[in-house]
Amino acid sequence: MLVGVGVDIIEVERIRAVCERHGDRFLERILRPPEIAYCRQFRAPFPHYAARFAAKEAVSKAFGTGIGSRLGWKDIEVANRPSGEPYIIFHGKAKLLLQKKNARNALISLSHTEAYAAAMAAIV
Ligand SMILES: CC(C)(COP(=O)(O)OP(=O)(O)OC[C@H]1O[C@@H](n2cnc3c(N)ncnc32)[C@H](O)[C@@H]1OP(=O)(O)O)[C@@H](O)C(=O)NCCC(=O)NCCS
């Protein structure tokens, strides 16, 4: 059963500019260490960072909460299978929300160009 869907698109430049101003502090507030390590493998990491930002917003929309007091950035972790396929690992409040919604998982798909990153999520 489909519990909720969410979509988000973001300008990569917005993330690059915030990183330039606030450096690692911004990334560390939004992303978990394995997410940062994944993006840092790439010569152009910003589209990957932006995609993770979009993924978390998309999952928060699928939950119907948005990011805030009911769901934090780092409660949602984006990981990748060896094939490259992304999946969500739930922590803290995201785990509780999943139980509350009687759901099992979130399905996610990401896409990025130099300029934009997009994500769609489905809670199932
Ligand atoms: C998997 C594939 C569809 C990704 O599409 P893309 O246009 O290269 O890149 P996009 O920006 O749209 O998507 C990238 C995201 O796809 C996701 N992805 C990667 N491999 C995936 C897979 N096996 N299954 C599902 N999603 C996958 C990842 O989340 C990735 O972003 P991330 O690395 O930041 O996590 C692509 O690599 C592919 O297989 N293309 C078809 C054949 C091909 O190689 N064509 C190129 C010549 S034109």
Image (cartoon, rainbow, N blue to C red):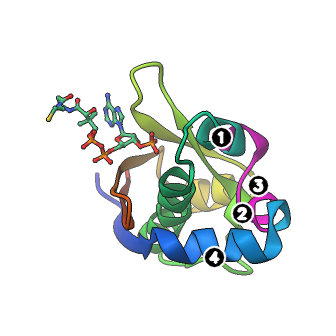
Q: Quadrant of residue 34?
A: top right
Task: Name the outermost residue toward the right.
Answer: 25
Instruction: Inspect the image, locate mark 3, and give the three-letter code of the amino acid beneath it.
Output: Gly
Q: Earlier in the sequence, mark 1 or mark 3?
A: 1
**SS at mark 3 in the image:** helix
The segment highlighted magenta reads: 26-35
- Closer to us: 57 or 92: 57
Q: Residue at x 48, y 68 (%)?
A: 12
For the residues marked 3 and 4, what is the alpha-carbon distance in whole angstroms?
29 Å
Question: Mark 2 is on which residue type?
Answer: Ile
- Of 110 and 4, the residue lying toward us: 110
Q: Secondary structure at mark 2?
A: helix
Question: What residue type is disc 1 on?
Answer: Arg
Label 3 sits on residue: 92
Q: Position of residue 3 (x, y in %)?
A: 36, 61
Residue carrying label 1: 40
Q: Quadrant of residue 93?
A: bottom right
Query: Mark 3 against mark 2, which lies toward the viewer?
Result: 2
Relative horizontal placement of residue 74, taking residue 113 as reference (left or right): right
User: Decide: marks 3, 2 in contact (CB < 8 A)?
Assistant: no
Q: What residue is pinned by disc 2?
A: 30
- Mark 1 and mark 2 in contact (Cβ < 8 Å)? no
